[in-house]
Image: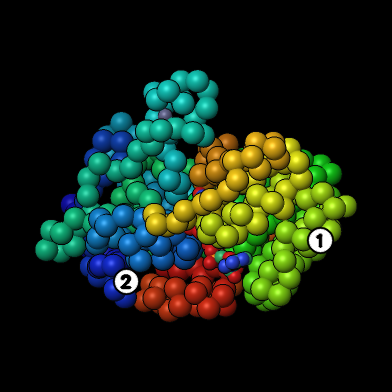
Amino acid sequence: MAQEVRGVIAPGKNEPVRVETIVVPDPGPGEAVVKVQACGVCHTDLHYKQGGINDDFPFLLGHEAAGVVESVGEGVTEVAPGDFVILNWRAVCGQCRACLRGRPQYCFNTHNAKQKMTLKDGTELSPALGIGAFAEKTLVAAGQCTKVDPAVAPEVAGLLGCGVMAGIGAAINTGGVGRGDSVAVIGCGGVGDAAIAGSRLAGAARIIAVDIDDRKLAKAREMGATHTVNSRSTDPVEAIRELTGGHGADVVIEAVGRPETYEQAFYARDLAGTVVLVGVPTPEMKLELPLLDVFGRGGALKSSWYGDCLPSRDFPMLVDLHLQGRLDLGAFVTETIGLGDVEKAFARMHEGDVLRSVVVF
Ligand SMILES: NC(=O)c1ccc[n+]([C@@H]2O[C@H](COP(=O)([O-])OP(=O)(O)OC[C@H]3O[C@@H](n4cnc5c(N)ncnc54)[C@H](O)[C@@H]3O)[C@@H](O)[C@H]2O)c1
Ligand SMILES: [Zn+2]
Ligand SMILES: [Zn+2]
C-alpha cells in the first residue's frame, strides 16, 4: 500500500522550499523503497530550486543519501530489504553504446523508478537527480541502491552519493591524477575539497587550493591542500604558475561552474595538462577562448559527470578507505540538521558557512 511520508519540495522557481506530505507508492518491478537515514545538501539542490536545471517543478529535493532498503519490487535481485545502501544517480543499463563498449561509467541510458511519487492531491513530483531523498522514504530503481559496509555512519556514507564522489572522481577518474602530479583546485566547497582529498589519495605532490573565502581555504588545507590562494586578492593563474616552477599545474579542477573560473583553470595548467570541469554552469553562461590557445596549449579539456564513477566499483572501495582511516569523510560534515532546516542550509551554503549540511532522520 502506498505510504505517506514527509519530504522537502521546491514548489516553484526561487520559492522557498517546504516540508510536505509525499505519497510513496509500493515498489513496482525493478524498484525499491528506501528508508532514508541521511541526506546531504548539495549545491545542485539549490540549482534545482533556482530553476537552473529545468522547469519540471515541483521537485522533491535531496540526492546525497544513504539508508536501508525497506521493500523491493518484482524481479529485484541486487538488493534485499535490510540492506544498507548509498543511493546513486548512475544506475547503468548494460545495453547502451557506452555500456556495450565496456564504458558503463558513461552510460547514456541510466534509469530511475518508473512510478511517480506525488503530493496528496496527486501532483507528480520530479525527484532531484531521480532520487528525491529529503524524505523519510523514497522510491528509486533498484540499480540506484549500492550496497556498502554497514559499519559506516549514514551521514558520511550518503555524501559519496554525489558531491564527494564527484570531487574524488574528478581527480582520480577524470583527471587521472597520479603520484607526483601537481594539481590545482578552483572552488573549495564540498566538491572541490573532495577533489583535494582525492588528489592526496592518488599521491599528488602539490595540491593548490583556490577560493575567494579564507575559511574555505583553511578547511582545504585540512583536506590535503599544500598551498592556498585567495583569488579575491591574488591572480590565481599567476599564483599557480609561480607555485609550479612557472609552468602551471598538471591537472586543474574547476569546481565552481563559472566561465571566469574555467578560464583561470584553462590558463593555470601546464602545456599538455588537463582541465577538468566538475562545476555545473547555468544555461546562459558562455565561454570565449582564443582557438589558437586551445590548440597551442595541447592537453585535454574534460568534463566530469559524477566523477566518472561506477557506483558498484567506487562506493564500496571509498567506504573501505574511510573505515581504514585513509579517507576522512567525516571532515565534510559541518552540521547535521532536520528535514525542516533545508532552506536555512541553502542560506548557509550561500554565505559559505558550511561544507555540507546533512539532514538526518
Ligand atoms: N559534475 C558533477 O557531477 C557535480 C556533482 C555535484 C556537484 N556539482 C557542482 O559542483 C559545484 C560545486 O558544488 P559544491 O557543493 O562544492 O558547492 P559549494 O557552494 O559548497 O562550493 C562552491 C565553492 O566555490 C567558491 N567560489 C565561488 N565563486 C568563486 C570564484 N569566483 N573563484 C573561486 N572560488 C569560488 C565558494 O567560495 C565555495 O567554496 C556546483 O556547481 C555543483 O552544482 C557537480
Ligand atoms: Zn548504458
Ligand atoms: Zn549533488
Residue 309 x, y percent position in the rendering: 55, 40
Most distant residue in the top direction: 101
Asked if residue 156 can be seen in this view, the reply is no
Amino acid type, callout 2: Asn
Q: Quarter of the image holding residue 57?
A: bottom left
The residue that appears at 77% across and 61% down in the rendered structure is 238
Cα–Cα gap, marks 2 and 1:
38 Å
Question: Label 1's element?
Answer: loop
Q: Which residue is mark 2?
A: 14
In this view of the protein, which residue sits in the foreground, 239 or 94?
239
Judging from the image, the colouring scheme is: rainbow
Disc 2 Cβ-to-ligand 1 distance below 8 Å? no
Residue 164 x, y percent position in the rendering: 58, 55
Question: Label 2's element?
Answer: loop
In this view of the protein, which residue sits in the foreground, 259 or 67?
259
Q: Quarter of the image holding residue 295?
A: top right
Amino acid type, callout 1: Thr
Residue 116 x, y percent position in the rendering: 22, 49
| Crowdedness near tag 2: few (<14), some (14–19) or many (≥20) residues, C-alpha within 10 Å | some
| Crowdedness near tag 1: few (<14), some (14–19) or many (≥20) residues, C-alpha within 10 Å | some
Q: For this view, does 98 lie left or right of residue 114?
A: right
Q: Which residue is mark 1?
A: 226
- Quarter of the image containing the C terminus? bottom left
In primary-sequence order, the first of circles 2 and 1 is 2
The residue that appears at 30% across and 31% down in the rendered structure is 75
Q: For this view, does 332 lie left or right of residue 297?
A: left
Asked if residue 130 can be seen in this view, the reply is yes
In this view of the protein, which residue sits in the foreground, 21 or 70?
21
The residue that appears at 59% across and 41% down in the rendered structure is 291
